[in-house]
């Protein structure tokens, strides 16, 4: 049995094995090896990617990729433990996390703005006077791109359904909504992969092949490709939330992880709407008869 007394600030203090009660609502994280480990893993992945693109094999890139995934898994595990089981994510900490997520999404907006800027700069002032450039045959926006638009819009409603189910204490609706959202995310990625595989133009530059390289494939694949990468990340994010939902981690008043995933997914939805309207639809409509020449 330990001796305990209350100081002038109302804080409990005791001897023996009693733990000190924090005097503030903030979370001062414990020292962690994952930042430095993650930096090394990212360096291996980047170096391996450069070597792979120069014909030196893929083994270093594979090691870096696996190391990055492993670091993400253990780091995420620690954050989940701190938030769910140790109670360290107080309302004040959650507010800070919301500000951080909002700023992260704002940075992503600027990231994609650069690709839209490049596309509009090239399409409004084309070097050879036509857009798309000669030899480029763009996708019909109302085929696979429109299908993917419907898929993402539907997924936005299902993730909202999941969130509202949680707020109402409906565990079954939460799991069903997240399951459908993850499936729709996988469908979007599959459709985009099929679309890329049947593109009439390519990223690799080759003067002897019409549509091989140039400003149109560069802006198209960079903008839509990075969006596709964000869909994959968001799908993984939501899959982790689905697993956590099945474990009962989320409560109506304590579920920032799910909230952040929903914010991210809605951002991905909005970016795709701009991509569809500007790059697929308007980009094709800007084509002149000369632009479709071969």
Image (cartoon, rainbow, N blue to C red):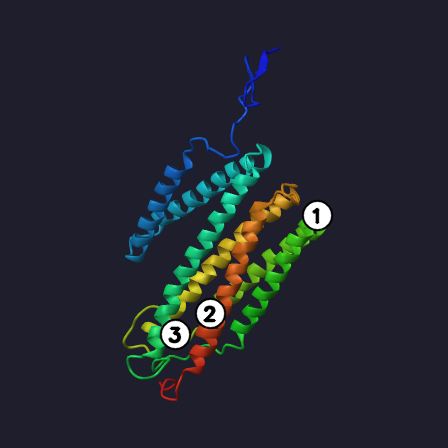
Marks 1 and 3, how far apart in space?
Answer: 46 Å
Q: How many marks?
A: 3
Q: Nearer the viewer, residue 244 or 55?
A: 244
Q: Quadrant of residue 152?
A: bottom right
Mark sitting earlier along the chain (2/3): 3
Q: Which of the 4 quarters of the picture holds residue 133? A: bottom left
State which quarter of the image contains the C terminus: bottom left
**Sequence-wise, which precedes: disc 1 or disc 3?**
1
Are the two marked residues, 1 and 2, in contact with CB atoms closer than 8 angstroms? no
Residue 276 lies, in percent from the top left, at 49, 72
Secondary structure under the numbered disc 2 in the rendered image: helix
Compared to residue 57, the image places residue 24 above or below, namely above
Whether residue 97 appears in this view of the structure is: yes
Q: CA distance from mark 1 to mark 2?
A: 35 Å
**Tag 1, which secondary structure?**
helix
Q: Would you call the spot at circle 2 few (<14 residues within 10 Å), some (14-19), or many (20 or more)?
A: many
Q: Residue 58: percent from the left, percent from the top?
A: 35, 51
- Local packing at callout 3 (Cα closer than 10 Å; few below 14, some 14-19, many 20+) is many
Residue topped by disc 3: 201
Q: Can you tell which of label 1 and label 3 is closer to the viewer?
A: 1
**Residue drawn 47% across the image and 57% down it:** 230
Give the secondary structure at mark 3. Answer: loop
Q: Nearer the viewer, residue 124 or 60?
A: 124
Residue at the bottom extreme, as displayed? 289
Nearer mark to the viewer, of 2 and 3 = 2
Horizontal and vertical percent for residue 110?
Answer: 40, 60
Residues at marks 2 and 3, CA–CA distance in whole angstroms? 18 Å
**Tag 1 residue:** 171
Number of residues whose C-alpha sits closer than 10 Å to that of mark 1, classed few (under 14), some (14–19) or many (20 or more): some
In the picture of the structure, the residue carrying the numbered disc 2 is 275
For marks 1 and 2, the one nearer the N-term is 1
Q: Position of residue 282 (x, y in %)?
A: 45, 78
């Amino acid at each position: 049995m330990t001796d305990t007394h209350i100081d002038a600030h109302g804080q409990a203090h005791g001897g023996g094995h009693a733990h000190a009660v924090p005097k503030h609502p903030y979370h001062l994280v414990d020292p962690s090896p994952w930042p430095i480990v993650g930096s090394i893993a990212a360096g291996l992945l980047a170096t391996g990617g450069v070597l792979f693109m120069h014909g030196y094999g893929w083994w270093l890139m594979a090691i870096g990729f696996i190391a990055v995934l492993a670091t993400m898994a253990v780091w995420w595990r620690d954050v989940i433990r701190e938030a769910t089981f140790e109670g360290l994510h107080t309302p004040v900490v959650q507010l800070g996390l919301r500000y951080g997520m909002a700023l992260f999404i704002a940075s992503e907006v600027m990231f994609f703005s650069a690709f839209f800027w490049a596309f509009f700069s090239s399409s409004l002032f084309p070097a050879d006077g036509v857009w798309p450039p000669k030899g480029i045959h763009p996708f019909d926006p109302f085929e696979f791109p429109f299908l993917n638009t419907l898929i993402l819009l539907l997924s936005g409603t299902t993730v909202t359904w999941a969130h509202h189910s949680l707020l109402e204490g409906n565990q079954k609706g939460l799991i069903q909504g997240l399951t459908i959202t993850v499936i729709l995310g996988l469908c979007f990625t599959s459709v985009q992969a099929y679309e890329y595989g049947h593109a009439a133009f390519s990223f690799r530059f080759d003067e002897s092949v019409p549509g091989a390289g140039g400003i149109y494939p560069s802006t198209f694949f960079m903008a839509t490709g990075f969006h596709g990468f964000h869909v994959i990340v968001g799908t993984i994010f939501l899959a982790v939330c689905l697993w956590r939902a099945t474990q009962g981690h989320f409560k109506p008043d304590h579920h920032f992880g799910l909230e952040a995933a929903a914010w991210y997914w809605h951002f991905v939805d909005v970016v795709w709407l701009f991509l569809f309207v500007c790059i697929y639809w308007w980009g094709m409509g800007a084509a002149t008869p000369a632009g479709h020449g071969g």
